[in-house]
């Protein structure tokens, strides 16, 4: 029995591609530092969406990450309560003269494109009339 809709299954496939791409780069210090910095940015930018997903699928909602840290749309908690992204970019800066910048840009852009595909699929699963607020 398949509990996922077709769109959710496609999202799951994209999630697996993201994970596989990251895991494929575990053995390269510069690549993994840059890719983890990208992930940190994704998490902060999209914490409201991620929090909703966790609430939907987590039976232990009160114990999840976002109940402690909040999201970027939460005025009572700071989703950006640490500087992981900055620390990662600083680590990369220390070895910048020892790496192939063009290759790093290529790998980072590929990863960003995978994230773009992931978020596009997430948005396609939402009801736009309920989720998007227009600013007048």
Image (tube, rainbow, N blue to C red):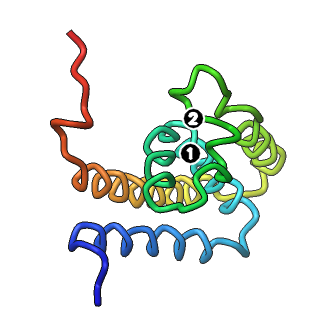
> In the image, 96: left or right of 130?
right
Q: Quadrant of the C terminus?
A: top left
> In the image, 51: left or right of 131?
right
| Element class at badge 2 | loop
Q: Nearer the viewer, residue 70 or 91?
A: 70
In the image, farthest residue toward the top: 136
Q: Which mark is residue 43?
A: 1
> In the image, 83: left or right of 43?
right
Residue drawn at the location 56% of the way across and 45% of the way down: 43
Residue drawn at the location 30% of the way across and 68% of the way down: 8
Pointer 1 with pointer 2, Cβ within 8 A: no
Mark 2 Cα shell of 10 Å, populated few (<14), some (14-19), many (≥20): many
| Element class at badge 1 | helix
Q: Which mark is residue 71?
A: 2
Q: Nearer the viewer, residue 19 or 6?
A: 6
Q: Nearer the viewer, residue 85 or 45?
A: 45
Separation of residues labelled 1 and 2 (CA atoms): 9 Å
């Amino acid at each position: 029995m398949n509990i996922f809709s077709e769109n959710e299954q496609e999202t799951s496939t994209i999630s697996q591609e993201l994970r596989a791409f990251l895991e494929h780069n575990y053995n390269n210090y510069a690549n993994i530092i840059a890719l983890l910095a990208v992930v940190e940015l994704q998490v902060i930018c999209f914490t409201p969406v991620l929090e909703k997903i966790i609430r939907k699928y987590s039976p232990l909602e009160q114990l999840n990450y976002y109940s402690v840290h909040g999201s970027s749309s939460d005025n009572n908690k700071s989703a950006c309560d640490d500087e992981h992204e900055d620390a990662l970019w600083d680590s990369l800066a220390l070895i910048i003269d020892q790496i192939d910048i063009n290759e790093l840009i290529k790998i980072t852009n590929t990863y960003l494109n995978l994230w773009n595909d992931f978020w596009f699929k997430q948005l396609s699963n939402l009801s736009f009339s309920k989720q998007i607020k227009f600013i007048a």
